[in-house]
Image (cartoon, helix red, strand yellow):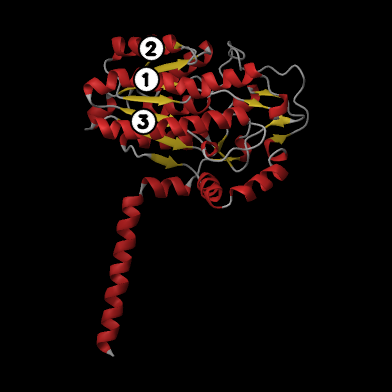
Amino acid sequence: MSNQKRQRTVVITGASAGVGRATAQAFARDGARIGLLARGQTGLEGAKRDVERLGGEAINLPTDVADAEQVEAAAEEVEKQFGPIDVWVNVAMTSVFSPIKEMTADEFRRVTEVTYLGYVYGTLAALRRMLPRDRGTIIQVGSALAYRGIPLQAAYCGAKHAIQGFMDSLYCEVIHDGSNVQACMVQMPALNTPQFSWVKSRLPRKPQPVPPIYQPEVAARAILYASHHPRREIFVGMPTVTAIVANRIVPGLLDWYLGKTGYNSQQHDGPAGPSRPFNLWEAVDAKVDHGAHGSFDDRATDSAPELWASMNRNLLCAGLLALALAAGAAWFRAKSEE
């Protein structure tokens, strides 16, 4: 079984930086052969070096996931070089930090094309190959924002909501077809990735993830786990669980709370500058390798007890059952001695 794990063929979109980069490293440690898809050539080269240094194999495939033909061509090349795709991970995204009233139609369209349709195109490319073989796993990197929209990121939140609805349909159809292809959506908390340095922004101060902030390796661990133990959904981090549950119970209260706090919580450290580069239309600093981490290392945690509990829920249930049985036995023993 371990040899089979080492030989898996994996595709990761958005692999040049952030969560995609950390995920490539996680699968490399697992011994995978990885197709790395992204726009930034230098970041792709860095990701490939990471993979090879950590024991995997990789090919770089410069791809704009908003172009269905490019995604299909990348999938074809991965299978040509590495064989059948076992796992497809959709990560690539873009966003705009801006009030809705200041957004343009082109900005909404581009965010939707990358962050939603990019996932659709990746899923279609994976399904074309996995369904005839009746095996494979598709993982969508989601967000708490797939359930609970926040101010200043309407285009991104809308795209994540769209992925959630798309996945509901996919789950139903896979069941109807009796297919063994697996699908999972991993819902993420705020993460320390480079996107906050290059996302297009109209905010008066620099954009930041809403604290508490987690390192991208936390996300990567969840994605790797999902590839071996696919579930319908995995929630990463207690803030994700809290946001999703609270939105189901008191969505109006969250509207009020986020209306009062959501602007300030997404900004920090003074003016961003009017000439700040952004990656909405093309990769930023194509000659720079941005890596997995953003600029919030001093505020981000690599610990996620809730994720550990979710990944080890069978062990925890067994432990709780053993404790309950021991407590029951002790109670009966005490009663018998009275």
Question: Label 2 crowding class (10 Å Cα cut-off): few <14, some 14-19, many 20+?
Answer: some
Instruction: Give, as a three-letter code, the residue at label 1.
Output: Leu
Which label number is shown at residue 291?
none
Specify which label sits upstream in the sequence, 1 or 3. Answer: 1
Q: Residue at x 34, y 29 (%)?
A: 30
Judge left or right: residue 222 versus residue 195: left
Q: Residue 337 vs residue 226: left or right?
A: left
Q: Is residue 54 above or below residue 234?
A: above
Q: Position of residue 191 (x, y in %)?
A: 56, 35
Quadrant (top left/top right/bottom left/bottom right) for the C terminus: bottom left
Residue plotted at (49% across, 17% down): 46
> Mark 2 highlights which residue?
72
Give the residue at mark 3.
Answer: 170
Q: Earlier in the sequence, mark 3 or mark 2?
A: 2
Mark 1: give few (<14), some (14-19) or many (20+) Cα within 10 Å.
some
Mark pair 1, 2: CA separation: 9 Å
**Callout 3: few (<14), some (14-19), or many (20+) C-alpha neighbours within 10 Å?**
some
In this view, the residue farthest toward the bottom is 338
- Which residue in the structure is indicated by mark 1? 124
**How far apart are the two marked residues, 3 and 2, measured between alpha carbons?**
19 Å
Foreground: disc 1 or disc 2: 1
Tell me what residue is drawn at x 72 percent, y 19 percent: 276
Q: Secondary structure at mark 1?
A: helix
Q: Where is residue 272, by image quadrant?
A: top right
Rounded to the nearest whole Å, what is the CA distance between mark 1 and mark 3? 11 Å
The percent position of residue 178, horizontal first and vertical second, equals: 23, 32
